Image: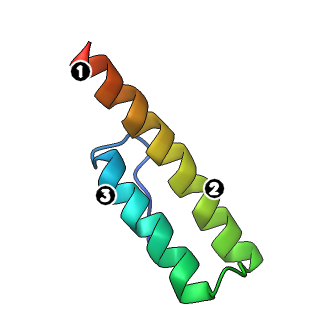
Amino acid sequence: MPPVPSCSVRSADEVNEQIRGLWLRTGGRLSAEQRTEYELLVREWAAAVHAEMDESA
């Protein structure tokens, strides 16, 4: 599993593309390890969305 930064330095779009890629590679069925990766990516995506909203305000 690739490392996921604890603080978001990637855009929400970049993280979303990685999430989509994970689902495509697995055919929508995640192993326990892949589910952990997915959960980390979703957290990173949410942080990036929040940061982008703060920047635009």
Name the residue at 35% across, 47% down.
Answer: 12
Looking at the image, is mark 1 or mark 3 earlier in the sequence?
Answer: 3
Q: Amino acid at mark 1?
A: Glu
x, y percentage for residue 38?
60, 63
In the rendered structure, the answer to whether residue 7 lies left or right of residue 55 reads: right
Which residue position is annotated with label 1?
55
Name the residue at 39% across, 57% down.
Answer: 15
Could you say whether the residue bearing mark 3 is in a helix, strand or loop?
helix
Instruction: Give the residue at the far right of this rendering.
Output: 32
Which residue position is annotated with label 3?
14
Looking at the image, is mark 2 or mark 1 earlier in the sequence?
Answer: 2
Instruction: Give the residue at the far left of this rendering.
Output: 56
Which residue position is annotated with label 2?
39
Nearer mark to the viewer, of 3 and 2:
3
Query: Which residue is more in the foreground, 52 or 37?
Result: 52
In the rendered structure, the answer to whether residue 29 lies left or right of residue 10 reads: right
Q: Residues within 10 Å of mark 3 (few under 14, many from 20)?
A: few
